[in-house]
Image: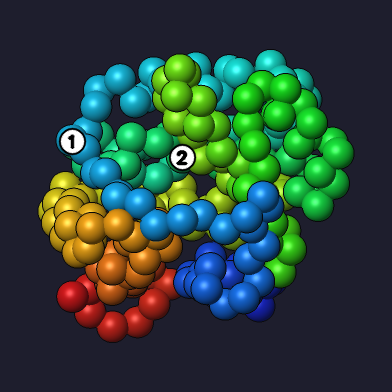
Amino acid sequence: MGGSAEATQRWRDAVMAHHDPADGRLEWVGGAPVPAPVRVVAYDDAWPGQFESVAAGIRAALGGAAIAVDHVGSTSVPGLPAKPVIDVDLTVADPADEAAYVPALEEAGYTLRIREPGWHEHRALVRRDATDVPQVNLHVFGPNCPENERHRMFRDWLRAHPEDRDEYRDAKLAAASATGEQLVMDYNRHKEPTIQRLYARMFRAAGWLDGDDS
């Protein structure tokens, strides 16, 4: 991100900010989810190809409205176990302008599930057709969103640092087995200490934070 040193630091601070979905800003569309077992499976070599198919479908549905479509989350990291759901970051001109993209995505099989106006105008859609592979979590943000940068940085860090990938793997497996039926947000909270530790290590390596990389 170009500009003054102050603007650069503001950008870095925004990228480093941890998001807490339990802070009350999240609106469930169609009702809140119910607890269910969280299934984490071994890495599947088919996931990158499945993402390419998903991305092609999104671009076909939205045309030029899809500014960028990125594969993020654990299915984007070779060798990392994950829930068998492809996580995608979609960049559109204005996530708050749902009419510009939600109807077309609904026609393509997606359902709007989350609005978070107070967090980069985030919207989340899902594709959960049992007859269609793969299932998808589609996260919608605007241009130059720090959360997109954060997701890409973490993906690339885990790809390049197998020891951290394995630390995250252990945390994911422990979180999935922590309870029987749980919300995904509960699963995420079990992982959070490890996630924050790995992010801090990554940001220190980038020169964004002081201290050791423990």
Residue type, numbered disc 1? Ala
Residue 18, image x, y percentages: 48, 72
Query: In screen coordinates, is 95 left or right of 21?
Result: right
Question: Of callouts 2 and 1, which one flags the residue occurring earlier in the amino acid sequence?
Answer: 1
Q: Which one is in front, 24 or 71? A: 24
Residue at figure coordinates x 53%, y 68% from the top left? 21
Quadrant of the rendering where the N terminus is positioned: bottom right
Q: Which residue is mark 1?
A: 42
Residue at figure coordinates x 68%, y 52% from the top left? 29
Asked if residue 5 shows in the view, the reply is no
Q: Which one is in front, 197 or 116? A: 116
Query: Label 2: few (<14), some or many (≥20) within 10 Å?
Result: many
Circle on res. 24: none
Residue at figure coordinates x 71%, y 29% from the top left? 106
Residue 204, image x, y percentages: 33, 71
Asked if residue 18 shows in the view, the reply is yes
Query: In screen coordinates, is 183 left or right of 169?
Result: right
Q: Which residue is mark 2?
A: 87
Tag 2 and tag 1, C-beta contact below 8 Å: no
Please tell me whether mark 2 sits on a helix, a strand or a loop: strand
